């Protein structure tokens, strides 16, 4: 009989999971709001030209609720996948919602700020996808 050896990684420190929770808190909040006001979520999707709105809204709710759970509690492989999915979603949503380059002058600055804030979030999620856990 062949013995299979497994390598166990040390437990992750609590501070790492807290940081992952903080990083994903906006998604959890957004997913809960959309879940409790699904009509509003559909209206938001329709506002950005995503039709039919209901499937897009449902997909966003699932991503915004499941993604953070996998990011904080999931195994490394799923954490990386969740981080990539959230990063891609955030980048695409920011292109749609924060298009400062085509905004009227009174909206240019707030949309530009929001766009670059979201780019920072995308970068943080990509770092989690690359690093996975503290060393």
Image (spheres, rainbow, N blue to C red):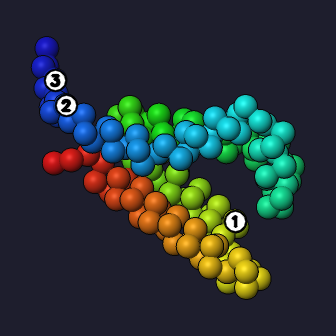
Labels 3, 2: front one: 2
Residue 24 at x, y percent in the picture: 47, 45
- Secondary structure under tag 2 reads loop
Residue found at x 67% / y 80%: 108
Q: Around disc 3, counting alpha carbons within 10 Å, would you say few (fewer than 14), some (14 to 19), or many (20 or more)?
A: few
Q: Around disc 2, counting alpha carbons within 10 Å, would you say few (fewer than 14), some (14 to 19), or many (20 or more)?
A: few
Front-lying residue, 4 or 101: 101
Residue found at x 38% / y 31%: 73
Labels 2, 1: front one: 1
As measured in the structure, the alpha-carbon distance from the residue carrying label 1 to the one carrying label 3 is: 51 Å
Which numbered dot is residue 97?
Answer: 1
List the residue tagged with mark 2.
11
Q: Is residue 12 above or below residue 128?
A: above
Marks 2 and 3: in contact by CB < 8 Å?
A: no
List the residue tagged with mark 3.
4
Q: Where on the picture, by quarter, is residue 124?
A: bottom left
Can you see residue 11? yes
């Amino acid at each position: 009989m062949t013995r299979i050896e497994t390598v166990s990684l040390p437990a992750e420190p609590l501070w790492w999971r807290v940081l992952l929770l903080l990083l994903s808190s906006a998604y959890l909040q957004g997913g809960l709001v959309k879940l409790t006001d699904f009509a509003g979520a559909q209206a938001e999707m329709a506002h950005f030209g995503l039709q039919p709105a209901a499937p897009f809204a449902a997909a966003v709710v699932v991503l915004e609720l499941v993604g953070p759970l996998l990011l904080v509690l999931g195994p490394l492989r799923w954490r990386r996948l969740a981080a990539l999915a959230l990063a891609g979603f955030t980048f695409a949503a920011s292109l749609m919602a924060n298009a400062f380059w085509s905004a009227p002058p009174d909206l240019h600055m707030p949309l530009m700020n929001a766009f670059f804030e979201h780019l920072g979030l995308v970068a943080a999620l990509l770092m989690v996808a690359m690093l996975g856990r503290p060393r």
